[in-house]
Image: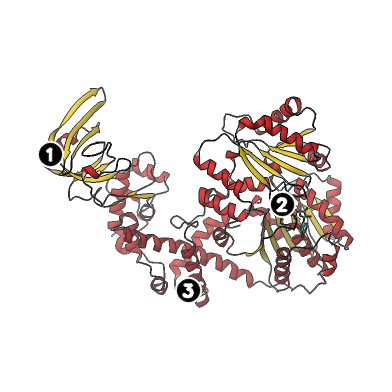
Amino acid sequence: MADLSTDVRTIKGIGEQRAKSLEKLGIRTLRDLISWFPRRYEDRTILRPIAELPPDEPACCAAMVAASPSVTHVRRGMELVKLRAVDESGALDVTFFNQTWLKNNLHLGETYIFYGRAEGHGSRRKMTSPVVEPEGRREVTGRIVPVYPLTAGVSQLVLRRSIRQGLDSCADILPDILPDSVRREHYLCHVGYAFENIHFPESPEALDLARRRLAFEELFLFAIGLRRLRNRRVTVSVPPCAAVDMDIFYKSLPFTLTAAQRRCVDEALADMASGTPMNRLCQGDVGSGKTMVAAACVYYAVKNGRQAALMAPTEILAQQHYAGLAPLLEDLGIRCALLTGSTPAKAKKSVSAQLAAGQIDFAIGTHALITGGVAYANLGLVITDEQHRFGVGQRAALIAKGCRPHTLVMSATPIPRTLALILYGDLDVSVIDQLPPGRRAVETYTVPGSYHPRLYGFIRKQVSEGRQAYVVCPMVSENEDLPDERKAVTEYARMLQTQALPDLRVAFVHGKMKPREKEAVMAAFSAHETDVLVSTTVIEVGVDVPNASLMIIENAERFGLSQLHQLRGRVGRGPHQSYCVLVSDSRNEETRQRLKVMTKTSDGFKIAEEDLRLRGPGDFFGQRQHGLPGLRIADIGCDTGLLKEAQTAAAELLDADPDLTTCPAMAERVRDLFTQAADTLN
Ligand code: ADP
Ligand code: MG
């Protein structure tokens, strides 16, 4: 009897060549083979009379061959087999290309099942290259047929036959890793039934059962793994922080915190007072005021005798945080320092020394905060801003500079709840779901490229009213036949300055400039020494220029919704009515729909849900955080109910058996999954 790790070459019909092709799909063993799930299914169960075949989608009919198939030689390498088949409702003229052997396999007077798209209407119809087989065989018709993702050298037929064989040889030995109690309680079918019916469903109901069982299993393993991470964390203990009179901090602010900000602060302070390390994600839309939540935490930690560090993904952002926070916190007796890649060596050395000696309480910076030489006397709070920009390693490195420091992750990427539950299952989450008072929604429009003259007029009008404008140039990917981003930005800026807006002050900034140059440009824009800033997406993250009231995004179709939302968040930060114009000539219906979402709502969470729905989870985080390993069947956009069920089940199981001693096979699978997933999970 086969075992699951048996090589696929033991399957009839899979030799060296096909094995190589399969390897490209990651299929090496029997287990890999039967875990290669269909991408979709074709329901070929329903037979229709010829006259009632739909004209626009494939369907099945049973028809008798009424005239012997004829072969026509059209030209070299092109032969047609033609035949006419009939049923009581009409006649079907069938043509096959280069399948000459069919001539001898389709016999006059016998009935076959044809599956294909029937052109025309009424009782005289045509089909080209349909799927065909004798009535009653039920291999490729008369059933729900799986359609697999393919690769060169492996056809649907080969996969179907190989998987059929694979299932036959190991159906009885498939281990069921779900505990019986869980299976019964959640009405999940047996693993053998699930694998059989995910590939070759007996009926739509059987397919649903199979899918439900396999999706549950994936989500369950995920939930177990995340819960174990969290359980491990809460067993670590640190000295609890003592109460601090926070009113001193609140009173020093130029405004009152919103209720949502206060709630996030309270949640974070409670964590730090709890005696176990805080591990919290603070999610808030752009402009919701995350920085002040961070500042409150810093104040609290420092008053408790700990050092704090805030790491931002870019120089500009670190600089801005420093400029905003240092004056405020210095006034409250907190010694602050800035440490970035462009800090001069001498200053760097001095800041390092002071951090090591505990003479600086709060360090703000970029990844320079974690480079080799920097040491901290007593780093107790680590805050990272705009979390998705950092690699796992960088955050971990900063955390390692302290002794079990509290961590606060601030993310301006609103993450749909379903995704947050999975991605951050081991983090506690606070949401700032409210903007500071007095904000007006940014008016958003989509326009075609022909509007450019009017747009330049609009820029001029805004500038004449004392405002400033951003123009974001197309994102350029490397292997495209377009100028590189530097060229795109500089040329666009030159065109604006020399032709369209010669009377305004135009500046530009792009990712390839030196940090110091970038900073200078940003500082000048911030000080209103320039009117129009042409840029790539470098301004996407966190930049705060409240006087800017207009954002024009060229080739908007190239951006994801979440990214457009981030960009739009750069305006509408001051008291002025602000505008965002998405320029796109795309006629693609999906694109137009996507852009329309932007004009309809300014709620980052809604936009994120929509983005997830339109693009799927794999794309949601862009290339870097590609997909969620282990989730091949579960669809986190749709399976919210099942996810909750799986999470409850996971919690119950772990409460009863924290070390999974009763289900070692499952424990092993969770371990495997989490070694693969380490990157995604941060
Ligand atoms: P983000 O969440 O995008 O990081 P910021 O922390 O940069 O937002 O805050 C955006 C702007 O709102 C800043 O100019 C900040 O000073 C201001 N702000 C923050 N909280 C409040 C508040 N409660 N009332 C008024 N303005 C606030
Ligand atoms: Mg911010």
Asked if 475 appears above or below 30 in the picture, the reply is above
Horizontal side of 151 relative to 650 (left or right) equals left
The answer to which of marks 2 and 3 sits earlier in the sequence is: 2
- Residue type at the position of mark 1: His
Horizontal side of 129 relative to 608 (left or right) equals left
Residue 376, quarter of the rendered image: bottom right
Check disc 1 and report the residue beneath it: 107
Ligand 1 is found in the corner quadrant, namely bottom right
How many marks overall?
A: 3
Asked if 557 appears above or below 426 in the picture, the reply is above
Check disc 3 and report the residue beneath it: 661
Residue placed farthest to the left in the image? 109
Quadrant (top left/top right/bottom left/bottom right) for the C terminus: bottom right
Identity of the residue drawn at 60% across and 29% down: 482
Quadrant (top left/top right/bottom left/bottom right) for the N terminus: bottom left
Circle 2 — which element?
A: loop
Q: Which of pointers 2 and 3 indicates the residue nearer the eye?
A: 2
Residue 410, quarter of the rendered image: bottom right
Q: Which of pointers 2 and 1 indicates the residue nearer the eye?
A: 2
The answer to which of marks 1 and 3 sits earlier in the sequence is: 1
Q: Which of pointers 1 and 3 indicates the residue nearer the eye?
A: 1
Q: Which of these two is toward me, 429 or 124?
A: 124
- Residue type at the position of mark 3: Thr
Check disc 2 and report the residue beneath it: 440
Q: CA distance from mark 2 to mark 1?
A: 75 Å
Q: Is residue 508 visible?
A: no
Q: Residue 116 — which label?
A: none
Count neighbours of disc 3 (C-alpha within 10 A) and say few if under 14, some if 14 to 19, many if 20 or more.
few
